Image: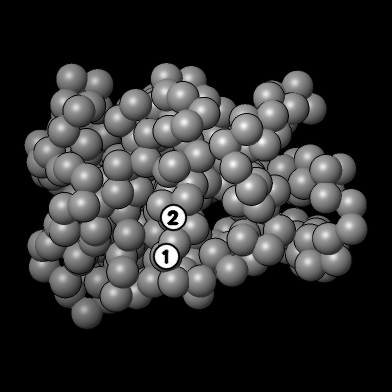
Amino acid sequence: MKIQIIRCLQDNYSYLIIDEKKRIACVVDTSEAKPIINFIENNNLKLKYILNTHHHFDHVGGNLELKTKYNSKVIGFKGDKDRIPEIDILVEDNQTWKEHDFETKIYHIPGHTSGHIAFHFFKEKKIFTGDTLFSLGCGRIFEGTYQQMYASLNKIKKLPQDTEIYCGHEYTLQNSKFCEANDIKNLKLKNKIVKIEECLKKGLPTIPSILREEIECNIFLRAKDLDSFSKLRDLKDNF
C-alpha cells in the first residue's frame, strides 16, 4: 500500500491510498478535486472510495466532483449522514471496513466535531486523524467538549508507538512554537523542530509523524489530566 500526499487549498492534505498492483485507490478527505484528479489521471488510477474524517468543507469539498467523475463511493460516520456530501456507506465506532485489499478500523474521535472519525489501517500501522490529532498539536474544539477531545487523543495514544500519523493540515511548525513555549526543557522536541525546519526548507511535508515522537513531544499528548489539557487548549486558542 502506497500513500501519496496531495497538497490542497492553502495548507490542507488529502491522501491517496494506492493499491499499486490493481491500480485502484481510496482518498482520505477531498479538500478540493483538481489536484487529486491530476494525480489520478497522470498515474492511471481508478478512484474507488472517498473516506471522510469529518464534515468540514475543507475535507469534503471535492466529494461531488470526484464521485461524479469516477463513480466512487463516499464513506463517513453514520452520525454525519446529513452533513457529508454524497455519502454512500455509513460506518461506526470500532467497525472494521474492508473492500478489495483496503482494510481499516474506524474510531469515533469527537471533540473537533461531534462526528469526527479516524481511519486506522492497522496492518500497515497508519492512521488518518483529520483535524483531531496534528503533528505537535490537536484540533480546536468546535462541537465537542474538552473531555471528548482528551479521550479521543488518549484513544489514539494507545495505538502501537510506531504508527504513522497522517493529519489534515501542515500546521507542524506553528504547533511546535506552542509546544516549545510550554515545554522548554524537552530536548526531544528541540531535535524534532530541527528536522521539521529542514523538511520545510526542502519543500517537503512534515507528515507523516510517528506516534512515539508525538507522545514524546506533543504537549497535548503529554498532558497528565483533563484539567491540564483543557488549560493548554485554551492557551493555544490565544497563542
Q: Amino acid at mark 1?
A: Leu
Q: Which label sits on residue 68?
A: none
Q: Position of residue 230 (x, y in %)?
A: 62, 30
Q: What is the secondary structure assignment of the residue under circle 1?
A: loop
Residue of label 2? 156
* Picture quadrant of residue 63: top left
Q: Position of residue 2 (x, y in %)?
A: 37, 72
Q: Residue at x 30, y 49 (%)?
A: 107
Q: Amino acid at mark 2?
A: Ile
Camera-side residue of 13 and 184: 184
Q: Residues within 10 Å of mark 1 (few under 14, many from 20)?
A: some
Q: Residues within 10 Å of mark 2 (few under 14, many from 20)?
A: many
* Picture quadrant of residue 1: bottom left
Q: Which label sits on residue 159?
A: 1
Q: Position of residue 96 (x, y in %)?
A: 16, 58
Camera-side residue of 152 and 239: 152
Farthest residue toward the bottom? 21
Q: Residue at x 70, y 48 (%)?
A: 219
* Position of the C terminus by quadrant: top right
Q: Position of residue 166 (x, y in %)?
A: 48, 56
Whether label 2 touches label 1, CB < 8 Å:
yes
Gap in Å between the C-alphas at discs 2 and 1?
6 Å
| Residue 231 appearing in the image | yes
Is 204 displayed left or right of 239 in the figure? Answer: left
